Image (tube, helix red, strand yellow):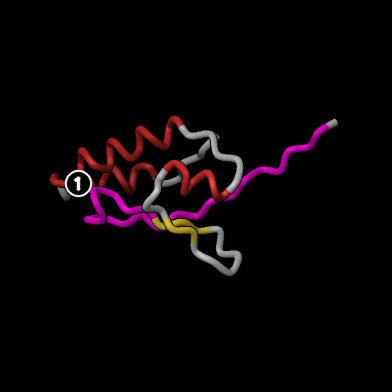
Amino acid sequence: MLRLIKRKSIEDFALQNARSKSSFRLWLTFLKMVNWAEPVDITETFGSADLLGKGSHRAVFDVSDNNYRMICNYYFRRTSVD
């Protein structure tokens, strides 16, 4: 499950930058469907995404062929097996 905290910020940007609207809409649609369990899942879904190192828990997404870049924090919940 993915939780997007600042969707409104993305939508506001897209409203002010009309050329980005369809690209961000597509990117947000993909995010609704993902079910990531570990960081490598991010790069398997988005081949152009980069995971930043040194325990930063951040990924950089290229949106619209790198016309826009999103730097996002990610966290994965630990699951336990009984």
The residue beneath circle 1 is 20
* Residue occupying the far left of the picture: 19
Image quarter where the C terminus lies is top right
Identify the residue at horizontal 53%, vertical 51% (top origin). 74
* Residue occupying the far right of the picture: 82
Amino acid type at circle 1 is Ser
Give how far across and how far down residue 13 sits, in percent. 24, 49
Closest to the observer: 22 or 46? 46
Total marks shown come to 1
Left or right: residue 33 versus residue 9 is: right
Give how far across and how far down residue 18 sits, in percent. 14, 45
* Residue occupying the far bottom of the picture: 54
Identify the residue at horizontal 54%, vertical 66% (top origin). 53
Left or right: residue 16 versus residue 59 is: left
Give how far across and how far down residue 37 sits, in percent. 60, 41
Residue 76 covered by magenta stretch:
yes
Identify the residue at horizontal 24%, vertical 51% (top origin). 65
Identify the residue at horizontal 43%, vertical 58% (top origin). 50
Is residue 27 shown above or below 64? above
Closest to the observer: 14 or 65? 65
The local secondary structure at tag 1 comes to helix
What range is drawn magenta here?
Answer: 61-81
